[in-house]
Amino acid sequence: MDTLRFPIGSFEPVVPFSDEDREHFIQQIPEIIRTLRDAVEELGPERLHIPYREGGWSAAQIVHHMADNDMNAYFRFKRALTEDEPMGSSYRQDLWAELSDYKDVPIDNSLSLLEILHSRFSILLNGLNEDDFHRKLRTQVLGTITLDTALQRFVWHNRHHTAQIKSLLHHIED
């Protein structure tokens, strides 16, 4: 496995997934933005546009991608709660990363968006019951998954990209 590309390893869902596991993952969501902000601040504005690895995105592109991805995840959750096994939308993240908003919008906009979105998402998740988390959605990457698995993937995805930004900091210092 490419440790630069996957600094925390690939996604491996927790099975079986208990009520305590679920609560643990939900409690991690507010920490995501704090950890991300700390990593970006430590990196500094002068290094935001340096790719974290050869052929990889810059820290700024990663932050904008995280905002886009988390909006999509939020909508997938809401659809799974109100529809029967909906197909989660997919998008060409590599092409989205080349659009003008990734280049011209300050990352503070995406950080603020993530903070607000994670607040809403936490409220939604805390209002669900166990049966809700057993609802399913279909994805092109993971196939049919429960919302329990989608929650784990959401937290992993954010930790994964934050670790990529942190790896840029260590790569530059070496």
Image: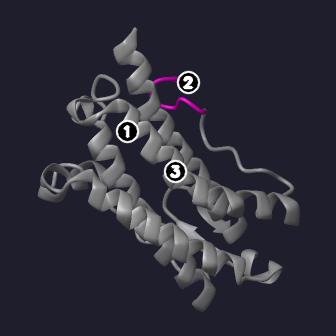
The quadrant of the picture occupied by the N terminus is top right
| Dominant SS type (magenta) | loop
Q: Nearer the viewer, residue 49 or 85?
A: 49
Residue 20, above or below 124: above
**Mark on residue 1?**
2
Query: What colour scheme does the image use?
Result: one colour
Q: Secondary structure at mark 2?
A: loop
| Location of residue 113 (image quadrant) | bottom left
Q: Amino acid at mark 3?
A: Arg
What is the number of callouts on the image? 3
Residue 61, above or below 118: above
The magenta segment is 1-8
Q: Is label 2 or label 3 in front?
A: 3
| Location of residue 85 (image quadrant) | bottom right
Magenta span contains residue 18: no
Q: Amino acid at mark 1?
A: Glu
Side of 33 where 102 appears, left or right = left
- Residue carrying label 3: 34
- Mark 3 vs mark 1, CA separation in Å: 10 Å
Q: Amino acid at mark 2?
A: Met
